[in-house]
Image (spheres, rainbow, N blue to C red):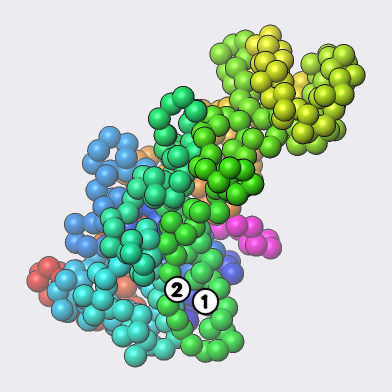
Amino acid sequence: MDNDQVTSSPAGPLDGVTVIDLGQIYNAPYATLLMALAGARVIKVEPREGENLRGRGRVGGAGAPFVMLNSNKQAVTLNLKHPEGAALLRRMTDRADVLVENFRPGVMGRLGLTGTSLRETNPRLVYASGSGFGSTGPYRDFPAMDLTIQAMSGVMSVTGFPDSPPVKSGAVVGDFLGGIHLYGAIVTALYQRERTGAGTDVEVAMLDAVYPTLTSSLGLFFGGTGESPARTGNRHSGLAESPYNVYETRDGGYVALFCVTDRHWAGLLKAMGRPDLAERDDLASRAGRVAHMDEVDAIVAAWARSLARDELVGDLRGADVPCAPVRGVEEVAADPHLLERGMLQRIEHPQFGSITVPASPLRIGDYQVGITPSPDLGRDNEAVFSGWLGLSAEEVLDLAEREII
């Protein structure tokens, strides 16, 4: 492990771990962001023109995701298609603990940069791959982006309303679930290495990572007719809870609420001022409320429309009923709870000015990390290639002139 860090900060859980980050877009960069925010030294390696997500910054405000996913990293440029560029990457991995990439399967093999080959000179290297469908299986070579994973995984089939076409999730579920699992795989492999002394290959396919999110729908499938479940809109995907829905309020807002237990149902009846419903045996149990789902929804919907959004939420929380307002992005990005916890941090970025970026959702002891802005393209070429690898200034200049870095 290399102890040379990006910034001087209190030692984090991954202090001393050096990561070579070949990630692009969301998947692998999120895994390496979590590592950087845990104290690892992450060196982002990009082609000379920059990775794809950085290029989006030229289109409206689409550069913000790059900023949010590449905080606390160093940045170098490297032409891996040039033999000397590939050789330089090898020199970097000889001194590193982890290499992370999410190219299509086979790309790194064609460059001669597989985990097996890189471990010939650094047997402790953990080589981590993220992809859409994995390195084996009949789907291996299919192009994969979040949209295609949502389609192939079944997520789109269960999203939306029964009388409408399938709808993608507005959130990027495939890439980020893949990235979270990739982080877990890497840290697991590092733990294994502490016991065995040997590195290994790890991989996470987005399709594999997304499948467990279908649990409610799969319960309906395996416990029902064996046919694909219909879309349920905002109702429970397994149609096993009632009330469980999103209700419109008097001021045009929306509130999500549901009752998991009979106690929640009793609290809801108290909030609604409907003690008469407590006398109905057919609504006393979850099974009964599910059997009368349409009626229950109509009762709750009528009450919700009589109140403003925040008033309704206040009444429900006062009765200890699980609920939440449906908030817009502008509300969430300024959320006082997330800001107070440090999950959201406001920084000054040299390109974008004042911007709010996420910190790590992982809380480990009393370790806290400050956010440093994402680096300009190739900002750390000299620091990494000269200061870390030991190349002379003349060698670095020559590599730049020959378009290797």
The answer for how far apart the CA atoms under marks 1 and 2 are is 7 Å
Q: Is residue 237 left or right of residue 79?
A: right
- The local crowd at label 1, few if under 14, some if 14 to 19, many if 20 or more residues have their Cα within 10 Å, is many
Q: Is residue 105 magenta?
A: no
Q: Is residue 366 left or right of residue 168?
A: right
Disc on res. 202: 2
Q: Is residue 44 left or right of residue 162?
A: left
- The local crowd at label 2, few if under 14, some if 14 to 19, many if 20 or more residues have their Cα within 10 Å, is some
Bounds of the magenta span? 362-371
Q: Is residue 217 left or right of residue 73?
A: right
Residue type, mark 2 in image: Val
Name the quarter where the C terminus is drawn. bottom left
Q: Are marks 1 and 2 in contact (CB under 8 Å)?
A: yes
Q: Please say whether residue 238 is visible from this viewpoint.
A: yes
Label 1 or label 2, whichever comes before in sequence order:
1
Task: Report the residue marked by disc 1.
Answer: 189
Residue 132 against residue 232 in the figure, above or below: below
Q: Percent position (x, y) of residue 246?
A: 61, 25
Residue, x 87% and y 14% (percent of image)? 276
Residue 185 against residue 255 in the figure, above or below: below
Q: Secondary structure at mark 2?
A: strand
Pick whichever, 154 or 194, lies toward us. 154
Q: Percent position (x, y) of residue 7?
A: 46, 65
Residue type, mark 1 in image: Ala
Q: Quadrant of residue 270?
A: top right
